[in-house]
Amino acid sequence: MPTLLSTKKLTLPQKHLLLNTGIGLVEYDAIGIKVLELPQNLNLQKNLIFTSKNAVRAVLPYLNREVIFGSEVFCVGEKTAALLKTEGFQVVECENYGKSLATKIIKEYSDRSFTFFCGKMRREEIPHLLKGSNINFTEVLVYDTRLNKKEIKSEFDGILFFSPSGVKSFTRKNKISGATAFCIGTTTAAEAGKHTNDIIIANKPTIENVIVGAVKHFKNR
């Protein structure tokens, strides 16, 4: 029976995707999130950029309903967009990757000013591209990612990775070799590619699609 290691604890509906597949599951949280306080003198723009659900959750306690309903939001990821809409935000644009979102902003919203909420370990694509096109934006760090560097002594047929940080955390004390790395997207796969060539990228960058990809892989093997 193949066994998967998930570098993120899965929800019950996500675990149900593995029911009756004959695939075993071990899970742990490879990273942790520490929320940071927002600056008191923050000049919030109407146009907000979020790249993850973590950023949304970190900011929510600081925003009143007037700000939420009056904002226009640009975000990365369907799950991020779904959370934003649930909380009352108007999502104007949603892309699967930061580079795609920045490109869309440059092409269609270059006259706007933005507040960009992100984590300390955020990738460079969005700020680099926006700066290069003279888009006015303020970057606000709202959470920090902590690596849970844990030695895993068991061997697995596949490892589920959901972020570059998760790959970095796992590989601090473990090796991927011998297991297939199932990655949520291209940036996560690029980090995993530093340690293995046996990589499968999900069809869409969601946790569910990573799991489904792993199930299909072992079913067809």
Image: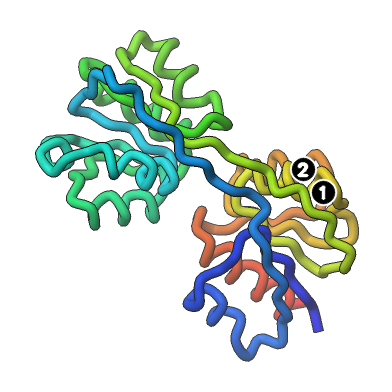
Circle 2 crowding by C-alpha within 10 Å: few under 14, some 14–19, many from 20:
some
Task: Give me the disc on residue 193.
Answer: 2
- Name above or below for residue 27 compared with residue 59: below
* Residue 94 image position (x, y, % from top left): 33, 43
Q: Amino acid at mark 1?
A: Asn
Position in image of residue 97 (x %, y %): 47, 40
Task: Tell me: 72 left or right of 118.
Answer: left
| Quadrant position of residue 134 | top left
Q: Which residue is mark 1?
A: 197
Closer to the camera in the image, 7 or 129:
7
Q: Secondary structure at mark 2?
A: loop
Q: Position of residue 88 (x, y in %)?
A: 18, 51
Kindly identify the amino acid type of the residue bearing the numbered disc 2: Gly
Dots 2, 1 in contact, CB < 8 A: yes
Q: CA distance from mark 2 to mark 1?
A: 6 Å
Residue at (60, 68) in percent of width and height: 211
Q: Is residue 90 left or right of residue 96?
A: left
Q: Is residue 195 left or right of residue 72?
A: right
- Residue at coordinates 38% horizontally, 11% vertically from top-left? 133
